[in-house]
Image (cartoon, grey):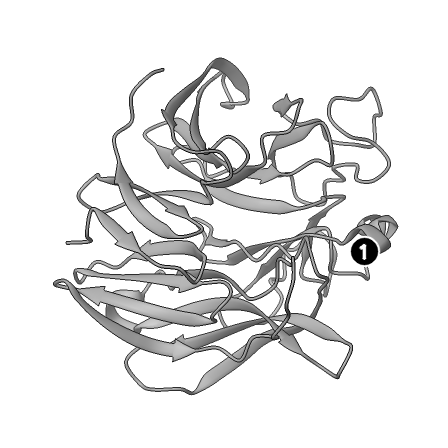
């Protein structure tokens, strides 16, 4: 059982639960991957992240378990590493959590910056790996360039190869025109991918991803009448910084970093693309919630910069 409150000062980002009574969490600024089992902690691996001082959004940014983890013990990680003295990039690797330090590189050379690196990953119903990648402000126009992997949702096979049915043949790009993706979740009924994309000063977005879709950044933000851009299902102005998300039944839950809150969207319509109700179901301290996660026992947890804690979901 995962503890109700766990202090973790390495800026924990992602929490994942395995079916064998283990849980894993990643720390962004230390590069450490931890395992918890029966209240015992084990350092699984220290990833060789880029070492940067001052404000930045680099490090160990996301982890996800293989759909066959019960048998293969594979975990996927996304982190920022240094290429040269002044250059660094993001990389996706997979490791066997029970077999030491060896890592297998799946995708390298993902654009990196001091901010907007993305890194949140999720397996789709078809067992392909989806990855959210942001784009830094200096290169934001490249979010529209298909050859550039920043500002994209990527989709790869578990071994790093490109799925044959990706919308752009031979490319891991699944959708483009994103700014700073911080959450991915698949609807339990229709299998569609919902993401949270952080706006600059306005127009945070919750989007449903269409293969090959152009979501506008930096040409448009929020709802537009442009026929070539896919509109979000909801926006937030002023920004709340929507973070990692999860579905509980048919409702979408996601964190708000700025407000330190958890939001719930009750979805309706034939394709679950209509917002029937929006509410805050947890409120903590501002600049706090990095993600929302649910354990196999149905308990809800949030990650914060200094801790992981169990919460109760109730209206405010």
Image x and y of residue 118, in percent? 61, 54
Tell me if residue 316 comes above or below residue 96 in the rendering: above
Image x and y of residue 127, in percent? 44, 57
User: Can the viewer see residue 8 in this picture?
Assistant: yes
Tell me if residue 176 comes above or below residue 108 in the rendering: above
- Crowding around mark 1 (Cα neighbors within 10 Å: few <14, some 14 to 19, many 20+) is some
Question: Image check: 226 left or right of 272?
Answer: right
Query: Closer to the camera, 95 or 309?
Result: 309
Query: Closer to the camera, 8 or 17?
Result: 8
Residue reaching furthest to the front = 54
The residue positioned 53% from the left and 80% from the top of the image is 48
Total numbered circles: 1
Tell me if residue 285 comes above or below residue 136 in the rendering: above
Question: Image check: 299 left or right of 26?
Answer: left
User: Can the viewer see residue 194 in this picture?
Assistant: no
Question: Image check: 136 left or right of 15?
Answer: right
Q: Quadrant of the N terminus?
A: bottom left
Query: Which quadrant of the structure image shows residue 22?
Result: bottom left
Q: Quadrant of the C terminus?
A: top left
The residue positioned 87% from the left and 49% from the top of the image is 141
Query: Closer to the camera, 209 or 148?
Result: 148
Question: Image check: 256 left or right of 45?
Answer: right
Tell me if residue 83 comes above or below residue 210 in the rendering: below
Q: Identify the residue under disc 1.
A: 146
Image x and y of residue 241, in percent? 59, 36
Local secondary structure at mark 1: loop
Residue reaching furthest to the top = 276
Image x and y of residue 282, in percent? 36, 27
């Amino acid at each position: 059982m995962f503890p109700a409150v766990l202090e973790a000062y390495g800026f924990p980002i992602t929490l994942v639960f395995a079916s064998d009574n283990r849980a894993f969490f990643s720390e962004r600024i230390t590069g450490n991957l931890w395992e918890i089992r029966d209240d015992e902690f084990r350092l699984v691996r220290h990833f060789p992240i880029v070492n940067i001082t001052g404000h930045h959004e680099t490090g160990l940014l996301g982890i996800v378990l293989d759909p066959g983890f019960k048998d293969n013990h594979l975990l996927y990680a996304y982190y920022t590493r240094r290429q040269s003295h002044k250059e660094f990039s993001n990389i996706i690797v997979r490791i066997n959590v029970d077999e030491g330090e060896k890592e297998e590189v799946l995708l390298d050379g993902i654009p990196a910056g001091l901010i907007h690196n993305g890194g949140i990953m999720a397996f789709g119903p078809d067992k392909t790996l989806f990855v959210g990648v942001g784009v830094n402000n200096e290169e934001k126009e490249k979010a529209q360039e298909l050859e550039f992997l920043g500002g994209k949702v990527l989709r790869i096979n578990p071994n790093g190869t490109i799925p044959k049915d990706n919308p752009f043949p031979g490319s891991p790009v699944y959708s483009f025109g994103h700014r700073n993706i911080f959450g991915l979740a698949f609807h339990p009924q229709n299998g569609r991918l919902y993401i949270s994309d952080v706006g600059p000063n306005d127009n945070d977005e919750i989007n449903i991803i269409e293969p090959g879709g152009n979501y506008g950044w930096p040409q448009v933000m929020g709802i537009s009448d442009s026929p070539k851009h896919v509109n979000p299902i909801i926006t937030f102005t002023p920004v709340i910084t929507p973070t990692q998300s999860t579905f509980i039944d048919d409702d979408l839950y996601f964190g708000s970093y700025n407000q330190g809150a958890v939001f719930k969207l009750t979805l309706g319509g034939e394709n679950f693309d209509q917002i029937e109700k929006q509410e805050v179901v947890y409120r903590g301290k501002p600049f706090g919630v990095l993600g929302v996660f649910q354990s196999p026992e149905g308990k809800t947890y949030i990650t914060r910069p200094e801790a992981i804690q169990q919460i109760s979901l109730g209206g405010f």
